Image (tube, rainbow, N blue to C red):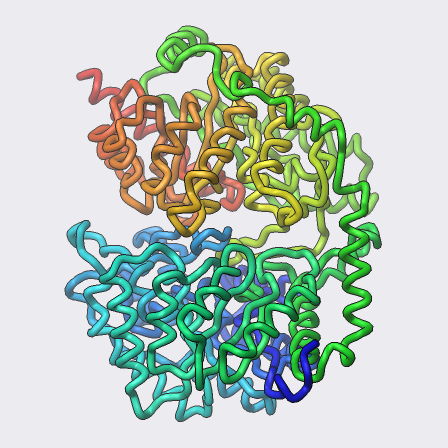
Amino acid sequence: MTTKSAAAAARATVYGHPRQGRGRELKKAIEGYWKGRITADALRATAAELRRTHWRQLAGAGVHEVPTGDFSYYDHVLDTTVMVGAIPARHREAVAADALDGYFAMARGTQDVAPLEMTKWFDTNYHYLVPELGPDTVFTADSAKQVAELEEALALGLTARPVLVGPVTYLLLAKPAPGVAADFDPLTLLDRLLPVYAEVLADLRAAGAAWVQLDEPALVQDRTPADLNAAARAYRDLGALTDRPKLLVASYFDRLGDALPVLAKAPVEGLALDFTGPAAANLDGLAAVGGLPGKRLLAGVVDGRNIWVNDLEKSLTTLGTLLGLADRVDVSASCSLLHVPLDATAEKDVDPQILRWLSFAKQKTAEITTLARGLSQGTDAIAGELAANRAALASRAASPITRNPAVRARAEAVTGADSRRSRPYAERAAAQRAHLGLPLLPTTTIGSFPQTGELRAARADLRAGRIDTAGYEERIRAEIQEVVSYQEKAGVDVLVHGEPERNDMVQYFAEQLDGYLATRHGWVQSYGTRYVRPPILAGDIARPEPMTVRWTSYAQSLTSKPVKGMLTGPVTMLAWSFVRDDQPLGETARQVALALRDEVADLEAAGTSVIQVDEPALRETLPLRAADRPAYLDWATEAFRLATGGVRPDTQIHTHMCYAEFGDVVQAIDDLDADVISLEAARSHMQVARELAAHGYPREAGPGVWDIHSPRVPSAEEAADLLRTGLEAIPAERLWVNPDCGLKTRGWPETRASLENLVAAARTVREELSGA
């Protein structure tokens, strides 16, 4: 039992907090500003009120030190780009004219200027804007945002700790700017960047910061000796500054490994470490380096990425061990609470038995403060909380909700033959060409079409009882008719039904599968103003009945062109959900794959000749450490093949991936054995096409020629130029023409214009290839 005297200094804090507000007020305000409905001052006022609300809630829950600087209008890495003055040349004029509009131009682009590239934040579903750097980059400090938010918190009488992306991680996340040699290493700019960080730190100290947190999550990845030397040099230099606050260097998402001794020796006052999941290895690592004598340790013992209640007694045991390894031990979540919803108690429709198993940001904050109190005052001080926690854990472990014997028996009976197509690709390709009769450079879209306000209103009307099911389905039929008719007129070759009935590509399926739990208010930021509600994987997965056949078949009845069946793959169903933590992920993936296999079979039986099983999350779920990747890729690719392996040779299986570093998973993409893969490529200038070619990828691919995460409409010539670049890597007979991703977030005017330009680009390049 922890004694009061042993840990009297233990305090509670968090790395960051969800930004959106209880009613997604930030999203609504930003989008209102974009549409001209509210002013910049009104937007700033909404943001300031949200920050105040979050800080007061944290302090009221017992958090002793609130984070500042983690709030963002779009992305905290983009905020860092502004802080260090690394504005791309093409955006400098816009930023100089209006800082806020220039900021959003970097994030979203304009009709004339492309945005920054966007990709996944480590192995999460959060997207960040990739810094663009080159040998001519000049850094200049702009600490206005960080200082202003610190002063806001201090004015409320709170103890506050600014949180910044650390300089090493910022450079490791960056890419060479357009026109810069591909082999340029942004880390060579470290000595140029550190004085800017020194200036920001001095400004924060002058504004009243006692501590500043510098996040270095890139150090939990496999790093080269040069990377580790750069980290050592960075914190040697920053630590040697005299005009600075105390420094807390933070890592999360995995174990630090070889970077731990580097940071432990650095002349900084504290480290913040993750002790959950694979990062639990940090405990042994910390002991191996002799602990952190004379330093503060911020112990991340509450999982900041999942939504299950913490095992408080297990966490207290870890904290008790850590007491002997640092001068002061404080308690936190493993990472920012940005990755979980706000408050589980808002879910009034969730079974009370299950609700007691759930812990969102508000509940995690309570767990952190409870643990800090138990560490400081002893377990007797939190006896009631411990008893309730034991009961919740026991309830979940014993619940029949979590186990379905029939599902488990079927999964155990799977053989290797179940995850293999009946014919090799060459034979399948010939059969598919004969069956589908598609032209060279066939055009298609990724699946979704604009989710209009009318569609969202129809779903709301159905939930509220203002229309009945028949009335709702009539609206869906009308939308499908419009989408199919438009694609035919535009000249698209392989059509989609547009997915008007779907609220989200994961949630839609989760709501129809046994074992999943959907939330009403569990919003989590994916990027910018895009928020999703990840469903909760609470038990074994089964498909009671077909999920997509009806609407796909209806769309096919409207046209003689092939209509793709659209499904979400097993890895993405896991990655974009809150997964169960009581069994290996591979076992859960196999259950989901078997449910999807049944859906694929039903689609094929209904006459669907092209079936797309999206796996955009394959790369983002890739473990951060190379040693952990083979096992993951084995079960991840096996799950996809299990879902798709039972179809006839002439049924064409597509998959889709977007906004990730595909070079890390090219072999896995090959191992999926899909007939066609579509991938994001517009922002990255066809990089993925070159990566596929270098690998010798043998099947068909559609690297995107239209960046759908920007409102700008690419011209036909721009799309044609990207196609020509793609043809340098992929033969014409294997190249498809498509957008980067689904069109759900776009409006109809830009969708019509962009899609018509895409089709025109394909026609132009076809004519060039034919010599016409």
Q: Residue at x 32, y 17 (%)?
A: 440
Residue 164 image-quadrant placement: bottom left
Residue 174 relative to residue 376: left or right: left
Residue 765, percent from left and from top: 25, 25
In front: 302, or 517? 302
Which residue is more in the foreground, 709 or 595?
Answer: 595
Residue at 64 percent of width and 17 percent of height: 602
Query: Compared to 351, does 10 lie above or below?
Result: below
Residue at 21% across, 20% down: 769
Q: Is any part of residue 349 visible from this angle?
A: no
Direction from residue 741 to residue 703 in the image, left or right? left
Residue 642 is situated, as x and y percent measured from the top left of the image, at 55, 24
Asked where in the image residue 384 lies, by quadrant, the reply is bottom right
Task: Indicate the position of residue 726 as horizontal and vertical percent values.
Answer: 26, 32
Q: Report the front residue among 27 and 218.
A: 218
What percent of the width, then of the height, locates residue 47?
55, 73
Does the image show residue 64?
yes
Number of numbered markers: 0
Q: Return the residue nearer the eye: 69 or 252.
A: 252
Image quadrant holding the C terminus, namely top left
| 438 relative to 84, above or below | above
The residue shown at (46%, 51%) is 123
Classify 219 as above or below 565: below
